Amino acid sequence: MPFNVLAYGATGDGATLDTRAFQAAIDARAESGGGTVYVPAGRYVIGSIFLRDNITLHLDAGATLLASEREDDYPVIRARWEGVERETHAPVIAGSHLQNIAIVGRGTIDGRGAPWWERHRAKTLRYPRPRLISFADCANVLIEGVTLFNSPSWTINPVRCENVTVDKVTIVNPPDSPNTDGINPDSCRNVHISNCRVDVGDDCVTLKSGIECEPPELRAPCDNIAITNCTMVHGHGGVVIGSETSGGIRNVVISNCIFVGTDRGIRLKSRRGRGGIVEDIRVTNIVMQDVLCPFTMNLYYHIGAKGNQDIADKRPHAVDHGTPRFRRIRFSHITARGAHYAAGFLYGLPEMPLEDISFDDVSIAMSPDAIAGEPDMADDVEPMQRAGLFIRNARRLRLRDVEITGQVGPPLIVMDAEDVDISPPIR
């Protein structure tokens, strides 16, 4: 039988802090060997709660978890945040070194992030904001069916986890909420993200693997990732890889997705010093509408390093362990309508060109009412408006049946590239 949180003192009245009752139910269920902790309809205010081995948290239809708005209800822990281990507020739902854990049901978790967003903008926070759901070093993780709103920062963030499934989840954070990414697997293996709707204030789904200042033993790759049957709305990117790439990202399939109103569609980003190999990426059967720039690959990403001349320099540098590499990346059967800045922006390094990149059966139509802007975040990149497909520093580039319409100027600009095959020519 499931352990009901009401039997452990939860009130569900939308005002009383129920953290202790939830934790007591989780701990009792774990001590009995594991099983389901049941949350019936009601409104439950909680701070950080920590799952244990073999626990399923089941939120019934009508059950809403309201994240406490008090900073003190989120203890400070050490965890990876933005690529490096540091002190940060614990997530609303957390756990580490666990197996067989799940959050399921038709209930809702409201992160009530507005006070956190304001403190972040005012720069009055001592520690990074809580994530809504984050597990570290766990195996067999399932998040299914729930609806997630107003996360204080990243919404779902597994770190160094294996066998992660996120299915039938709805995530909605305001478009102007800062850094409220949807689903961010970080150095995870064997991840399946499917049948989700993600509408957020930053990237919708992002794959990460740590940064260069983290100890090498913690830089596990992010690999064997499948993202399918999802709708992405309003985010800075539909599906994003990087910019934390130091551990490598590989074996990724993105298929059967719809992007509406995202700044970029498929976005890959890294920079000198970060290192890592991003390889064997397959993107197929995608429809985009009203996206600012459908495709970007940017090895000059400057957030956190704007003005750094080593990163911004367009001349070749020596290749070393900090040189990132993008290779074997395939785009096929993709339609983008109403693009604004450019059909695509692909900018490799002169010392490490983008390698073995192909576009097959790709149709891009620029918006007649396009706005102008920078196609990606890099120093010395001029704003674009209704530009074609821009590619610089590439090797083994294949374009088959690529159509670009409504652009101003040439449909394709290729610079400093070798072994380029275009069939038929793009007109």
Image (tube, grey):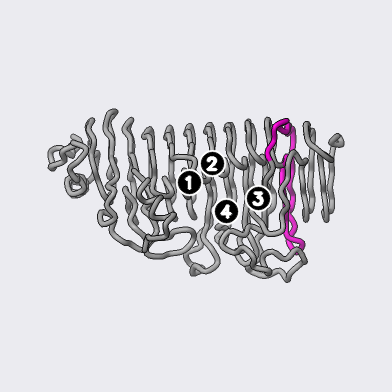
Answer above or below: position of 242 versus 308.
above
Count residues near mark 1 (Cα–Cα under 10 Å), then give few for <14, some for 14-19, many for 20+: many
Q: Secondary structure at mark 1?
A: loop
Q: Which residues are magenta?
A: 342-371
User: Residue 4 location, x and y as percent?
Assistant: 18, 37
Residue type indicated by callout 1: Asp
C-alpha gap between disc 2 and disc 3: 14 Å
Q: Secondary structure at mark 4?
A: loop
What residue is rendered at 44% in x and 50% in y? 162
Answer above or below: position of 220 versus 225.
below
**Of the pair 70 and 278, the residue shown nearer to us:** 70
Seen in the image, is 215 located left or right of residue 261?
left
- Labels 4 and 2: the sequence-earlier one: 2
C-alpha gap between disc 4 and disc 2: 15 Å
User: Residue 416 location, x and y as percent?
Assistant: 83, 56
Q: For mark 1, what is the residue?
A: 181
Q: For mark 3, what is the residue?
A: 376
Label pair 4/1, CB-CB below 8 angstroms: no
Count residues near mark 3 (Cα–Cα under 10 Å), then give few for <14, some for 14-19, many for 20+: many
**Of the pair 196 and 140, the residue shown nearer to us:** 196
User: Residue 98 location, x and y as percent?
Assistant: 33, 52
- Labels 4 and 1: the sequence-earlier one: 1
Looking at the rendering, which quadrant does residue 237 occupy?
top right
C-alpha gap between disc 1 and disc 3: 17 Å
Q: For mark 4, what is the residue?
A: 242
Disc number lying in front (4 or 2):
2
Asked whether residue 386 appears in the rendered view, the answer is yes
Looking at the rendering, which quadrant does residue 150 occupy?
top left
What residue is rendered at 68% in x and 59% in y? 379
Q: For mark 2, what is the residue?
A: 235
User: Residue 299 location, x and y as percent?
Assistant: 67, 57
Q: Quadrant of the N terminus?
A: top left
